[in-house]
Image (cartoon, helix red, strand yellow):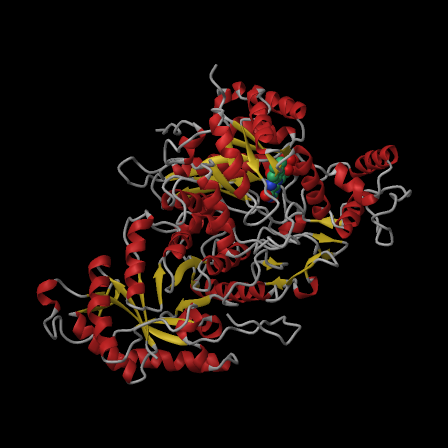
């Protein structure tokens, strides 16, 4: 039986409470040496790509800058361009918002990244944003949720027109694009880059987001927290592909995950519990609860019981983070969970906020990751380590060889471009 | 102190290797910085991304991409330049330029072409807001205080609340204050409309001049305008901008080849001659206090840069007129410019690089 081989990517852990910055091994989140270490480790592990998130305004809570998590990050395309100089094969993926950029400029920056990296660029197209973020930009405003994906789709379509606009012998051909969001014309300034089209990643979970992924993306950066949920998501997104004349192999689904390793299962569980506690300090627990309850809870004891006051929906309380959905409903769910299990505030936040974790010995983790892929809950994973920059070292040294032994992961890079690592065909050249 | 810099522009080069060869050559010659031109109007890669690619493969030379301000977002521009400073550990500069043509405006479809004056006024606002955003994090904002659970001291982060004539920015930046505090701002101040912006915001002004008196006149004017803006004139380095054609092997060693000083051409003032003659011109203009240094654009990139480094620079070094090693590591240190104080600083303690 031939085994489905998984794809692996590494996320640079940044601005959220994944990162355990209090750990003595935690180093700078901004110095280039941290990025270089993580990227080189990922390349040593033969990963497909290295992934950077984006946020265009610092988060605020109760009108003040959120100060409990790592804050501050470099601009992605610039860091990835520099990383191209210290890696050879690793794909380089930048999250860049389609609402606060213009196609000509961004297509050019990605084409340049693809050129200077020899065909390793990827763009994670995100649309999450609001008027709060818009205050940093000329546009000054923002788009309605529905419009954000139509702009993103037209943005990507326009970028592909630009990327394909030079003749094979290196002559720029004039282009013109006239649509609802863009009316532009001229000549693109960069010849066709090694990948033709940089790889496109999508990371939204709404119906519009899934549809956009099915129509236009090469990779989905997903978020789900169990094998069953993963299988449902996987089947749903893959089913949508046929409508766009695409096959299931054309789109790779890669959930973001955490991995905690130990010499024994019990030791790994203990370590994972400790990491979760560190990720959710007493202060973080209270602030998270405030975000859900929509009210000031600063007088509560994080090790005490949940408040017995009613939650209110207050979207202005916390700004600059991705939607949490219906907070009042979440509050009710959390309150029920705490009652049922007798949990404190901090324990509830830890328990309810859990993301997908693979915890165990290297052997157990390798087996479980492989199972996710064989059972079609994922095509691979985006690892989100909790430590910068050493958080990937153990996985690469101890789990990757076991995956390779099982035939579940590559033993060498076969090509040089990210498309070749992902097994994606080169884009068809039009006209 | 004499300051030398060179352009690494190359027609139709998109791979990293050819730029890396030139930047390493310039670094071997101890040059202060290299520039890479950029424009949406003609073929060429994104200059900032190319120079970021070179950062880890070089160690001392300053990296100065052109980043335009007309159709770009000031918030993105400042973040990218600050990031270039992080990835190069304090070697970033930013050559500020504007996009004046209708053709460039059509590539964006957001606004029409505007007169140069208005665009340079806006470029000044972009330079201003960039400095504010670079300062929007104090140097010691990151505290990692485990007992209180705080990663940063939020009192050391600042909204900039900038309102310009064509844009506004709330801030703070997403990027912590870069190693140089402010990456070095470079403006070509040859044309009138750019001159005020240069005098007010630039650390380095480039002046394309065909003669010593012309260069001296512009430098004097820039220095007095700088003072009018409340800055010390010595905070501005004025470099003469010349295209250089150092000839082929035969003529290179011949003194006086090409004859005389720079000549005006449609591409700008062009100096033709051997490396020795160029050293003579540089030594004279600098020795007489006409300029603080030179920005040289080789006509034939590899050939002329090699001649510049192996001939002209070697000679200037031999005569004790130019450095033989980099005494510091940041571009500001090469230029003898202080690390700027933070305009929002709430404490006295400062970290020097
Ligand atoms: C795993 C994952 C990672 C994401 N990372 C980012 C990010 O770095 N920056 C960002 O602005 N949005 C990020 N998002 C949010 C979105 O990509 C998306 O635009 C947003 O969720 C709105 O779309 P939706 O309604 O389809 O979810 C992420 C989403 C997911 C699922």
**Which residue is outermost to the left?**
B250
Reply above or below: B148 against A177.
below
- Looking at this view, is A68 or A210 the one in front? A68
Q: Quadrant of residue A324?
A: top right
> With respect to residue A232, does B300 lie above or below?
below
Location of ligand 1 given as a quarter of the image:
top right
Residue at the limit of the structure toward the right, as seen here: A308
Coordinates of residue B271 in the picture (x, y in percent)? 21, 69
Q: Is residue A147 visible?
A: no
Give the total of numbered labels.
0
Q: Is residue A70 above or below residue A427?
A: below
The percent coordinates of residue A84 (x first, y second) are 41, 47
Q: Nearer the viewer, residue A253 or A144?
A: A253
Q: Position of residue A218 (x, y in %)?
A: 49, 30
The answer to which of A359 and A118 lies nearer the viewer is A359
Q: Position of residue A45 (x, y in %)?
A: 47, 38
Furthest toward the front, the residue is A263
Q: Residue at x 34, y 78 (%)?
A: B292
**Residue at the extreme bottom of the image, as rendered:** B288
Classify the position of the C terminus of chain A by image quarter: top left
User: Is residue A395 found left or right of B141 in the rendered image?
Assistant: left
B124 sits left or right of A58 in the view: left
Residue A90: name its quadrant. Answer: top left
Q: Is residue B221 above or below residue B73?
A: below
| B279 on left or right of B131 | left
From where the camera sits, is residue A343 visible? yes
């Amino acid at each position: 039986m031939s085994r489905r081989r998984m794809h692996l990517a590494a996320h640079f852990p940044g601005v959220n409470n994944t990162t355990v910055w209090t750990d003595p091994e935690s180093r700078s989140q901004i110095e280039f040496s941290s990025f270089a270490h993580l990227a080189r480790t990922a390349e040593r592990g033969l990963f497909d790509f290295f992934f950077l998130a984006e946020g265009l305004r610092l988060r605020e809570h109760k009108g003040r800058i959120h100060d409990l998590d790592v804050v501050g990050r470099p601009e992605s395309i610039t860091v990835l361009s520099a990383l191209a100089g210290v890696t050879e094969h690793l794909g380089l993926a930048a999250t860049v918002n389609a609402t606060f950029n213009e196609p000509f400029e961004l297509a050019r920056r990605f084409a340049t990244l693809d050129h200077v990296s020899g065909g390793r660029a990827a763009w994670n197209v995100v649309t999450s944003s609001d008027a709060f973020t818009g205050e940093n930009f000329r546009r000054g405003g923002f788009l309605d949720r529905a419009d954000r994906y139509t702009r993103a789709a037209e943005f990507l379509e326009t970028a592909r027109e630009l990327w394909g606009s030079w003749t094979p012998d290196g002559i720029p051909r004039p282009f013109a694009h006239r649509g609802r969001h863009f009316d532009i014309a001229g000549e693109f300034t960069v010849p066709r880059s090694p990948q033709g089209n940089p790889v496109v990643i999508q990371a939204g979970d709404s119906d519009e987001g899934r549809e956009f992924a099915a129509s236009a993306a090469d990779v989905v950066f997903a978020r789900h927290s169990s094998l069953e949920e993963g299988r449902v998501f996987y089947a749903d997104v893959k089913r949508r592909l046929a409508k766009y004349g695409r096959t299931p192999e054309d789109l790779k689904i890669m959930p973001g995950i955490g991995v905690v390793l130990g010499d024994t299962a019990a030791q790994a569980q203990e370590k994972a519990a400790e990491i979760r506690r560190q990720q959710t300090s007493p202060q973080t627990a209270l602030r998270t609860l405030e975000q859900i309850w929509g009210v000031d809870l600063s007088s509560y004891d994080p090790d005490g019981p949940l408040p017995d006051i009613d939650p209110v929906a207050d979207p202005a309380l916390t700004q600059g983070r991705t939607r949490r959905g219906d907070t009042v409903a979440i509050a009710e769910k959390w309150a029920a969970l705490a009652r049922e299990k007798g949990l404190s505030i901090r324990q509830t936040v830890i328990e309810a906020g859990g993301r997908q974790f693979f915890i165990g010995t290297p052997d157990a983790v390798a087996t479980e990751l492989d199972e996710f892929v064989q059972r079609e809950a994922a095509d691979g994973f985006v690892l989100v380590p909790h430590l910068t920059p050493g958080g990937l070292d153990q996985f690469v040294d101890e789990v990757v060889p076991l995956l390779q032994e099982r035939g579940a992961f590559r033993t060498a890079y076969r090509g040089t471009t990210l498309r070749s690592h992902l097994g994606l065909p080169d884009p068809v050249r039009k006209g | 102190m004499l300051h030398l810099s060179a352009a690494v522009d190359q027609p139709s080069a998109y791979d990293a290797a050819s730029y890396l060869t030139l930047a390493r050559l310039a670094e071997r010659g101890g040059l202060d910085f290299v520039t890479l031109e950029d424009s949406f109007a003609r073929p060429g890669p994104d200059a900032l991304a190319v120079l970021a690619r070179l950062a880890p493969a070089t160690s001392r030379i300053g990296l100065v991409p052109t980043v335009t301000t007309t159709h770009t977002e000031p918030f993105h521009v400042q973040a990218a330049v600050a990031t270039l400073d992080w990835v190069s550990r304090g070697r970033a500069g930013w050559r500020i330029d504007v996009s004046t043509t209708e053709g460039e405006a059509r590539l964006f479809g957001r606004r029409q072409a505007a007169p140069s004056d208005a665009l340079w006024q806006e470029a000044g606002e972009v330079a201003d807001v960039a400095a504010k955003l670079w300062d929007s994090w104090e140097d010691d904002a990151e505290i990692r205080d485990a007992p209180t659970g705080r990663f940063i001291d939020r009192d050391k982060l600042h909204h900039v609340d900038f309102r310009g004539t064509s844009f506004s920015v709330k801030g703070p930046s997403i990027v912590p204050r870069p190693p140089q505090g402010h990456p070095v701002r470079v403006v070509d101040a040859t044309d009138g409309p750019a001159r005020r912006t240069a005098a007010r915001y630039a650390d380095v002004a480039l002046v394309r001049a065909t003669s010593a008196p012309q260069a001296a006149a512009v430098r004097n004017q820039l220095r007095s305008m700088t003072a009018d803006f409340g800055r010390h004139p010595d905070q501005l380095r004025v470099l003469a901008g010349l295209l250089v054609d150092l000839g082929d092997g035969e003529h290179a060693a011949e003194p006086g080849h090409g004859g005389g000083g720079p000549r005006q051409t449609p591409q700008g003032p062009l100096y033709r001659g051997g490396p020795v003659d160029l050293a003579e011109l540089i030594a004279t203009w600098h020795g007489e206090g006409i300029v603080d240094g030179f920005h040289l654009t080789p006509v034939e990139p590899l050939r002329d840069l090699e001649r510049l480094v192996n001939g002209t620079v070697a000679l200037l070094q031999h005569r004790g007129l130019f450095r033989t090693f980099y005494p510091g590591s940041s571009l500001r240190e090469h230029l003898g410019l202080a690390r700027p104080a933070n305009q929002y600083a709430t404490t006295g303690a400062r970290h020097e690089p």
